[in-house]
Amino acid sequence: MDMTAASRPRRSDATRAAILRAARERFAADGYDRATIRAIAADARIDPSMVMRYYGSKEGLFAAAAEFDLRLPELAAVPAEQLGEVLVRHFLDRWEGDETLAALIRTASTNPGAAERMRGIFAEQIGAAVVRLGTDPATAARRAGLITSQILGLAFTRYIVRLPPMAEAAPEELVAWVAPTIQRYLTGPAPASA
Amino acid sequence: MDMTAASRPRRSDATRAAILRAARERFAADGYDRATIRAIAADARIDPSMVMRYYGSKEGLFAAAAEFDLRLPELAAVPAEQLGEVLVRHFLDRWEGDETLAALIRTASTNPGAAERMRGIFAEQIGAAVVRLGTDPATAARRAGLITSQILGLAFTRYIVRLPPMAEAAPEELVAWVAPTIQRYLTGPAPASA
DNA sequence: GTCTATAATTCGATAGAC
DNA sequence: GTCTATCGAATTATAGAC
């Protein structure tokens, strides 16, 4: 009954981490439906029932695996005219080494819960960053949505569909092309219409 | 054995069409895995075995349901500076009334065959349109890829994830914001880099 | 903590009556 | 052409031995 030792690393933490790592890979590669608990357990070299024991259900496992922090840099420190460039480069860097976003995109396509999570991630993190820059509140949400549309379109064509011109392009080339788009969505004048 | 009547409408054509319509709806709403033959058959008010009889397999049904023509307008007739606007408006119009693209996006996220089909659709139709405009062959493929990235990002955020600022925006407002992006990808100067 | 065995569903596909 | 019945496989999830 000794529970006084706060958060002492449990013996099973390594197993939990291994499950989570395998889950992220499988969800990223196959999406929610095709990624089976059996396959994830096999990757993690443990028994499928362990996954249920630790995470309760497949949904619970996904919820744990789909935590995703965009790790946006502090934009206030960036010269205003370089915001687009910094953001595009940041996203490409962030994704090349972490499959979680691919998992989220694949899963959000068919799973309402994952779509909800994706809305939360981009609304809160990108939306909040846009607001923090002092953007006009009347257009801030729309600007954040437009940025998200181009950023997710970039990820979708490059990592999911693997459209050759996008998948094979050097990151810096994509930065050069796409940065002005993000820059305009962020700081450009709102169109007269509507 | 009378097979001389060429392409006389068969009695089962209505059933085939009903199946296809239901399949498109289900694939669009649920993606490939979650859309079951049983559910599609129930929607079409026919027996599940009919689907197999007409389309051979679930893959065959999807292949028939995922035919998709972007129906790009003839761009040569459009004033050069209005190309972006015309294209964005066309895509929004094209999608609002046809769920096939949503089905394709949902399915391409996890199904390699559907991803291949999506590569084909956008490479051939958008790529070809860009080339037909007389674009420099050295950058035409990249420009087509970038246009695809923004167009699919628009569709993904508006119809799949339903990010509020994108899902609720009036079409003309999206046209006003996004058209300059497409215009620049299509006719703007290539960046100096790489 | 770990594993075996299996329950309870659900699916794609097939066989065959009518 | 249409339907009933069902097979065989795969899945999530649970129960319980060790």
Image: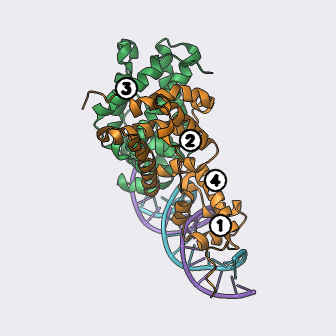
Chain colours: A orange, B green, C cyan, D purple
Residue designated by label 2 = A160
Same chain, marks 4 and 2?
yes
- Cα separation, mark 2 vs mark 1, equals 27 Å
Q: Quadrant of residue B81?
A: top left
What x and y, as percent, mark residue B99?
38, 41
For disc 1, the neighbor class at 10 Å (few under 14, some 14 to 19, many from 20) is: some
Which mark identifies residue A25?
A: 4
Amino acid carrying label 3: it is: Ala
- In the image, residue B186 sits, relative to residue A123, either above or below, namely above
The residue nearer to you, when weighing B179 against B120, is B179
Return the disc, 1 or 4, that comes first in the chain's sequence.
1
Q: Residue at x 51, y 47 (%)?
A: A105
Q: Which residue is mark 3?
A: B179
Specify whether disc 3 shares its chain with disc 2: no
Say whether residue B69 is left or right of residue B137: left
Q: Position of residue B121 (x, y in %)?
A: 50, 30
- Image position, residue B77 (x, y; %): 36, 12
Tell me which chain the residue with mark 3 is part of.
Answer: B
Looking at the rendering, in which quadrant would you find the C terminus of chain A?
Answer: top left
What separation in Å lies between label 4 and label 2 (alpha carbons)? Answer: 14 Å
Q: Quadrant of residue A158?
A: top right
